[in-house]
Image (tube, rainbow, N blue to C red):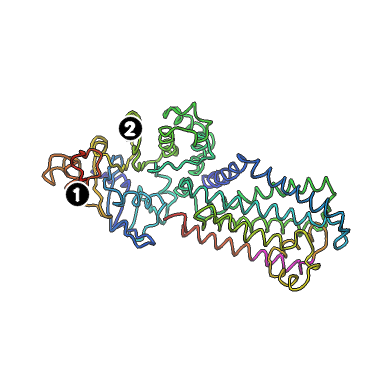
Amino acid sequence: MTASQIRFFSLVRRECNRFFKIKRQTVGAPLLETFLYISVFGAALGTRIDTLQGVDYVVFIIPGLILMAWAINAFTNNASSILQQKFQRAIDDQLSSPASPLQLLLAFSLGGFLRGMIVAALTFVAASLLVGLPVENIHVLLPALFLVGFFFAQLGVLVGVRAEQFDDVAFAQTFVLQPLIFLGGVFYSASLLPEPFQTLTRFDPVYYMIGLVRYGFLGISDGGSVAVSLAVLTAATLALFMLNHRLFVRGYKLRV
Amino acid sequence: MHDPGVPTALAITDLAKRYPTGTEALRGVSLDIEAGEFFGLLGPNGAGKSTLIHCCTGLAQPTAGSIRIFGHDAVGHYEEARTAVGLAPQDVNLDWFLTAEETLDYHGGYFGMPKPERRERTKELLDAFSLTEKRGERTRTLSGGMKRRLILARALMHRPRLLILDEPTAGVDVELRLELWRYVQRINEEGTTILLTTHYLEEAERLCDRIAFINDGQIVARGTSRELASEFAVESLEDAYLELVGRMELSRAKPEEIAP
């Protein structure tokens, strides 16, 4: 391995080490939360809802729950990790190393991305065992999930870099992220909503992400064209990545 | 004297730093530290010592001027420059999630050290700083003195050629201060160039080959302790410092000298 590869691997290892050290909070709790959603919305409410778009209600909501697990964990991990290290100034150890802004950004991004992936994968395994989840379009599912994970990882980095107190992260998660995810149609089909809510939902980017993931798993979607959604998601993720890279190059709120 | 075959350890030219708030922390600082030197930078709080160090280590971005570390541009070609520098900051900035051993191992990784070398160096430094028994403990559980020692060990992990110590003995007890002095003297004797900032004039006098006074973002005097005293026609470094800085923020200031 070259010095640069060792450097990058160490940066990523540190980010993963952080969430594994508090795995009850970072992996266990989200897993339990997802299980509770499946129990309450699927098992309890699902008995009163027959099918949605031709599939059992509990099966209908699981793709959205997997997306939600990946998105929220990717976001929370990165925002918290960066803010906490800024707060302690422990981040100076990485910032004063020879690591490039790109290496630093990718390493911080991958921490949350991988944590989200682990929680999402465990949710998938548990859901498959419980209800038998199909995978209809893996060629759409994998890029969609990876893009969603990377998009929210970038969003977490952005919020973490900009944040000056823990309240800033909590605000973004509670007042922006969760409403977008919940109102994006994790637990229902947007086609069931009355106007103007059905139209409003179409302005929620998460609606299209859920559409992609649901199409990947179940082969059904009310989120518009798969190709257009994938293209827009790719463009949005790239734009966010480039913005973050610019912030890291400038040292925005990281270097004085 | 400068050996033409060896690049200057730290060459700062016309360095300026203006913070977004408008504060001019550095105003045209120029400074040369030769390889192998033990150099002291003295100045009152807010004089620009930490800003200068942050500019040298990439933690602050200079507004103007240049910094070369062993010939490498610290801003444009920071990879080589930062590899040559070890920083022990003023504040304890250890990562709470890491153990003492991990702190050193990750730091070595950030500087591209292969695993076997990291393992060997970690063991060596934990032994040298009497931290071996605490290697598996998270940093937040260490005592103040242990944290300070770990910070110094971390700065030395990648075998820097230039070690920057930003008030390393601030707030530590006499025993640890003497221990740290002995250690940094030994490192210097082994060839590492050291830049030390301190409020303790006794520390600077005892350890440093040359000293510079910084005040209000400018280097106002430089030389050996004796040269500085002689230049200002005073008895000691302390008197020279008082003459220049005109403040009473000194470790050896007598209580009766401090205005109520």
- Labels 1 and 2: the sequence-earlier one: 2
* Location of the N terminus of chain A (image quadrant): top right
Read off the chain for label 2: B
According to the picture, the residue beneath numbered tag 2 turns out to be: B177
Nearer to us in this view, B147 or B252: B252
Q: Main secondary structure of the magenta part?
A: helix
Kindly tell me whether residue B82 is visible in this rendering.
Answer: yes
Nearer to us in this view, B56 or B139: B139
Kindly tell me whether residue B11 is visible in this rendering.
Answer: no
Name which residue lies at 36% across and 61% down. Answer: B63
Q: Where is residue B141 shown, x and y percent of the image?
A: 49, 34
Residue lying farthest to the front in this orientation: B260
| Discs 1/2, front | 1
Q: In the image, is residue B51 above or below residue B234?
A: below
Amino acid type of the residue that numbered disc 2 sits on in the rendered structure: Arg
Read off the chain for label 1: B
Task: Report whether B48 appears left or right of A144.
Answer: left
According to the picture, the residue beneath numbered tag 1 turns out to be: B246
Name which residue lies at 76% across and 51% down. Answer: A37
Q: Where is residue A130 shown, x and y percent of the image?
A: 83, 46
Kindly state the secondary structure of the residue where label 2 is placed: helix
Label 1 vs label 2: CA separation? Answer: 27 Å
Q: In the image, is residue A37 above or below residue A188?
A: above
Kindly state the secondary structure of the residue where label 1 is placed: loop
Magenta stretch? A222-235
